[in-house]
Structures are given as structure tokens and as C-alpha cells.
Amino acid sequence: MTTSSADAASRMPLSAVPLHAGHASGTVLHLDTPLSFWGGTDHHGTIIDAHHPQRGQSVTGRVLVMRAGRGSSSSSYVLAEQLRQQCGPAAIVLAERDAIVVLGAIVARELYGSDMPVALVTAEELAELPTGLAVTVDCSTDHGSVTLPD
Amino acid sequence: MDDPTGPTLQLTPDEQSMLDGEQGDGIAMAMRVVVGLARVHEAPRLVKIESAHIDGCLFHGQSGLDFASRLVDLGATVRVPTTLNVGSIDLLHPGTVRNQTPAEQEVSIGGRALMEAYLAMGARATWTCAPYQLDARPGLGVNVAWAESNAIAFCNSVLGARTDRYGDFLDICAAITGRAPFAGLHTDEARLGDVLVDVTAIPDRVLRGDLAGPLLGYLVGSRVGTSNPVLIGMPSETSEDTLKAFGAAAASSGGVAMFHVVGVTPEAATVDIAFGGRSPTETITLTSDDLVQARRELTTASDGRLDVVSVGTPHASIDEIAHLAALLEDGPEMASGVDFYVSTGRSVWALAQQRGHRDVLEAYGIRVVTDTCTYVTSILRPQAQVAMTNSGKWAHYAPGNLGVDVVMASLRECVESARAGRVVIDDDELR
């Protein structure tokens, strides 16, 4: 393998399962372990979980890439609250079907017109999205993709 | 990669009509939420539910109130019998929840508005985390949509009614549409046992004691996570209160939403039935030593100091209140420095008054909390440092939520300690 995974991602858009429709561009924040929004982030989007390796970083405006969320159903509430205050992620890319994350996104769209997409990719594809990569996440009801902008 | 062309959600004409807004904007909004979740779960269809229990009444921020208020404004009402979980304030005992700091006042005002919004949608003012203690409860095989982790575990495991793990937002939308995604614990397959838990080595006397439920629940939840445990060796007459305490602790330390107790719970007449003929993925054997160790893990206080006792999480049943009254009656007074709380539902408390337990509790200075709970809102005095509880769930959450140290104890130890004004526990209860 001579090509880095980031280069591979830049050449070909990743096809994704759309878990929640929306469209956003941003810089990837790739979390090393799953994050619970409830108890793990504050209402301003900062990771406060004392045991999380990325503690202190902000999810605001980032394309949050993580295998799955974790923990309580109140995480939907916290994500919706961040999106209300415009300090939530720009998009979320997961490798597992996380209903709690999607519920927060649905509620934020209903109430505040949030356009934050949630996309599902494989674990291997997730690894091709390192922190710092600029990507666009696009999800309709039927199709989803994660691409590097030109 | 999942196949994006995989199972697609089929809606009935009535469900499609709700989604299309033909039955009102509030119903359409609720249906968008239910359908959105059904797609995430890859549910092939929705399932009709016969009741709902709503956990959206605790105030965590403006978005929760915005959501409920929007549904009210759009004219949504519940279409199945709907009970309400605890709120952030005690409506029957106005002085119970502190209301001094700006944060406390925000919770008080927002919390009351949130409770009123759910009532406006036609839900019953039950305000309890133990809806299974109310008059009507769903029977074996009935599909419902319940939120609140202890209620979910009890509903699936002890009643044999079927609910997946619902929480804020989805719960009320299921009540409004009368539908939930046909997925998870609504399906036969997901209800079968995964892990065998053998407690036959623990003496019967201990298993009948009131520490067995919370400590076994804590241990099992920690070990099995979100799998379905199957217990063997529990006494055939294990009480609902023990099962309640077990489920609440297992849902807190792990994420258990369905458990079986062979010979006790309705989908576990035999081990083979509980596992649906499959083999356990794992077998866990628990002993009295494990119970002693579990109590140590849940106990964060190290000296004998005691400031407060809190029992009734989940809400105390009428039997538990009668037990407390019996332990108190004709005994010495409580020590002056220890506040003693019991949390319960308003319907159980009404029954307790009829049966004369209120007089006994009041004579001993017991503070009764209804409609809410001591670990979810500002009730304990700020100076309290060490709290004793008989609840595995309370012990799990209180150190983080309230910043107190905890001692895990039986109800009898709680009363004896409150009388002594210091921690009095005896591990011989567990051997």
C-alpha cells in the first residue's frame, strides 16, 4: 500500500446509508472512542467526559466521525440542545445505526430547521476519515455520500 | 456496507395518512419522528401499541420544552392510555425541591411548564417511574411504548409486555400516533435469553432479603451490558419488589432491558424456553462473596458518617412503605442529624394514607417525596456528604448527579443507621 487512506477518500466519494437527511461541509473530528452526548459533552459542544481521549475538544461545526454514540437516551436531548444553540456538529458519520443520535437530529430539524446529516459507513470506511480532513456529507432520504470538496 | 435497497418500511394507509398530515399537523410531526426511527432500525413496519409511558417530563433544557410545546400548539393528543414519569418538581409537596439559585429556578419554571404540556396532550398525572404499580398494566405479549430504563426492564421481563428501549421524544410521538417501529424487543427473537446467571450457590435467606435485588442487578448489568440475562436459582416466590430492584440496577450498571428469572417471570417457565432452545453465550456463577464485593463497589463512603437516607428508587411500592412503617413502629426515634427520604408515586402514597402508614412515617419525621425523585433534582440539603440507600440505581447515579458519597444498605440497615446517626451495616446479611 503506497496510497494513504486519505488520498483514497479524496479520489472517490464514499457511498453512505443516509440515517438522517441533510447537507454539510466541515473538517473531520475523528473520535477514538464512542461519545455520550449526555454527560460527555456540555451544551456548548465541548467534550467534557473525563475518560474520553479527546476531552476538551469542541464538536461545534465539525464533521463528527465516530463508530457510535454511547449511553443514555438523554443524549438525544443534549444533541438537540447543542443544535438549538448552533454549537452542535455540522454532520455526524457513524459505523453503527445509532437511534439516539438520529433522534436528536430529527428533533433539531423539526424545531430549529437544523440541516445536520447523519450518515452510516462501514468501519473500514470510517477509518478513511481522519481528523483534519475537509469533507462534505450529503444525505437525502434514499442516498448518502461523504466526499472531499474540490 | 448495509444494502441501501434493503428492507423498506411499509406503512398502512392509516399510517401514511398520519404522515401526510391528513389527521393534523401534530400527528404528522409525531409520525415523522416514529418513521425516522423506524428507518434507522430497518423496521419492516410499525406496530400498534396499547399504552405508553413517557419519560420526557424531566427538564434538561429548552429543547425538551420546545418539543412538547410545539406538539401541543399543533393540536396533538395521545391516542392510547399514557402515563407520565417523574418530573423535576414535587407538585404535592411544594417545599421539597429547592428553588433558590437561578439554575434551580430555571428547572422549577421550565419543569412545571413541561409537566403541564404533557398533561395538555391527555396523559395521566401519574408522575411515577413505577407505572407497573398503577391500576392498569399491560399483559403478556401486548405491545406498548415505555420509556425510563427501569420501567422498560420491568415491563418486558416481569409483565411480559413488549417495549423497546424508548426515551425522550420518541415516547410521546408513539403515544400520539399509537405506533412504534416493529424492531428490537417487540420481536420474538430479541427477547430470548443470551447469558445464563446461576445464583444457586447463594443462600435462600439472602435471596429473599432486600439486598439481593439491587446487588444482583448491579453485578449482572455490569457483566452482561445490553444482553438478556437468564437467572436460575431464585426462589419461586421472588417478589415484584425484588424484580423491580434487580431490573433498575441492571439497567443502570449495564443496559439491560429484558431479563428472565426461570420459574418466576412469564417467558421463562424453563431454561430452555427462556433461551428459545439456543445455548447461552456465557454462564456466570454468582456467590455471596460477589454480593459482598458488589456492596463494596457501590459504597463510596469510607467512614461512619451519615447525613441522609434515601429509599424508594424506583418509587416505593405499598408493600415497601408498609415494611418501612413496620420497621419504624414502636421503635426509638431517628437521630436528629439524619434526613430520611422515601420517594413514591402519588397513587401509592394515597393508598399508604388510607392504610395508616402516613401517620407512622410522619411520627418518625420521614420526608415523603412524590412526583419526582431525590437523585434527579435539588432536594437533599447542600451540606449532605454521605447518603445511605437501598437502591442500586440511586447508588449508581447519586455520586455523579449529587456529589454525595453513598452507602448501599438494606431497608432495615437504613432505619437502624438513621436511628444511630451513623452507618450501621452487617455483611452477615449477605452470607
Image (tube, coloured by chain):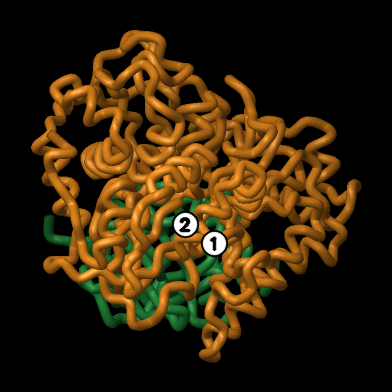
- Residue at x-position 26% and y-position 59%: B417
In the image, residue B239 lies at what x, y percent? 42, 28
Q: Looking at the rendered structure, which numbered label has been put on residue A65?
A: none
- Residue at x-position 66% and y-position 80%: B109
B213 is higher (above) or lower (below) than B413:
above
Chain B is which colour? Answer: orange
Q: Callout 1 environment at 10 Å: few (<14), some (14 to 19), or many (20+)?
A: many
Figure quadrant of the C terminus of chain B: top left
Q: Confirm or deny contact between disc 2 and disc 1 (CB under 8 A).
A: yes
Foreground pick, B237 / B274: B237
The quadrant in which residue B214 appears is top left
B322 is higher (above) or lower (below) than B414:
above
Image mark 2: chain: B
- Residue at x-position 58% and y-position 37%: B132
Query: Helix, strand or loop at disc 1?
Result: strand
Q: Which amino acid does the dot numbered 2 rest on?
A: Val
The quadrant in which residue B208 appears is top left
In the image, residue B119 lies at what x, y percent? 77, 58
Q: CA distance from mark 2 to mark 1?
A: 6 Å
Q: Callout 2 environment at 10 Å: few (<14), some (14 to 19), or many (20+)?
A: many
Q: Which chain is green?
A: A
Foreground pick, A105 / B225: B225
Res A84 visible:
yes
Q: Looking at the rendered structure, which numbered label has been put on residue B342?
A: 2
- Residue at x-position 54% and y-position 40%: B318
Query: Helix, strand or loop at disc 2?
Result: strand
B292 left or right, relative to A136: left
- Give a yes or no on whether discs 2 and 1 share a subunit: yes
Q: Residue furthest left?
A: B289
Image mark 1: chain: B
Q: Which amino acid does the dot numbered 1 rest on?
A: Val
Please name the residue that numbered disc 1 is placed on. Answer: B369
